[in-house]
Image (cartoon, rainbow, N blue to C red):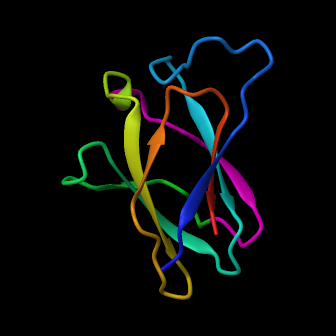
Amino acid sequence: MRFPTVLLALAACGLIGNAHAEEYSFSIHNNSGSKIVRVQVSEDGNSWGDFNIGSGIAAGATSELIWDQSTNDGGCEWLFAATFADGSTSDPESFDFCEDDLVIEFE
């Protein structure tokens, strides 16, 4: 299993999280040796959906992703899990999307 870690970088003037803004972005950094081919998200841990990552996130690459506006009324805490090209998966990990400039790192 691979385990994600969170790197939080606060913007110099960022005082309020923007998880409910019209367009909220965050980044995923793949610090593993295998391409990320699937990212799943869940707000409640029971119902999971796929996050659109296009053709994947190459090993060593960082991709900026944008939440769909349908999640604007959701909470701040979401679970993320990644599947890698080598067949391994990460355990679900909780992230707070009310934080500014969130970077999720999968190792």
Q: Quadrant of residue 48?
A: bottom left
Whole-percent x and y of residue 61? Answer: 76, 62
Whole-percent x and y of residue 11? Answer: 75, 23
Q: Which residues are magenta?
A: 57-70
In magenta stretch: residue 9:
no
In magenta stretch: residue 65:
yes
Eyeballing the image, is 25 above or below 16?
below
For the image, the number of numbered tags is: 0
Q: Residue furthest left?
A: 46
Tell me what residue is drawn at x 72 percent, y 27 percent.
10
Name the residue nearer the viewer: 100 or 34: 100
Name the residue nearer the viewer: 29 or 8: 8
Whole-percent x and y of residue 51? Answer: 44, 53
Q: Residue furthest right?
A: 12
Q: Quadrant of residue 66?
A: top right
Tell me what residue is drawn at x 68 percent, y 52 percent.
63
Name the residue nearer the viewer: 98 or 24: 98
Eyeballing the image, is 60 above or below 9?
below
Q: In this image, 80 relative to 31: left or right?
A: left
Q: In this image, 2 relative to 103: left or right?
A: left
Whole-percent x and y of residue 96? Answer: 47, 35
| Screen quadrant of the C terminus | bottom right
Eyeballing the image, is 7 above or below 55?
above
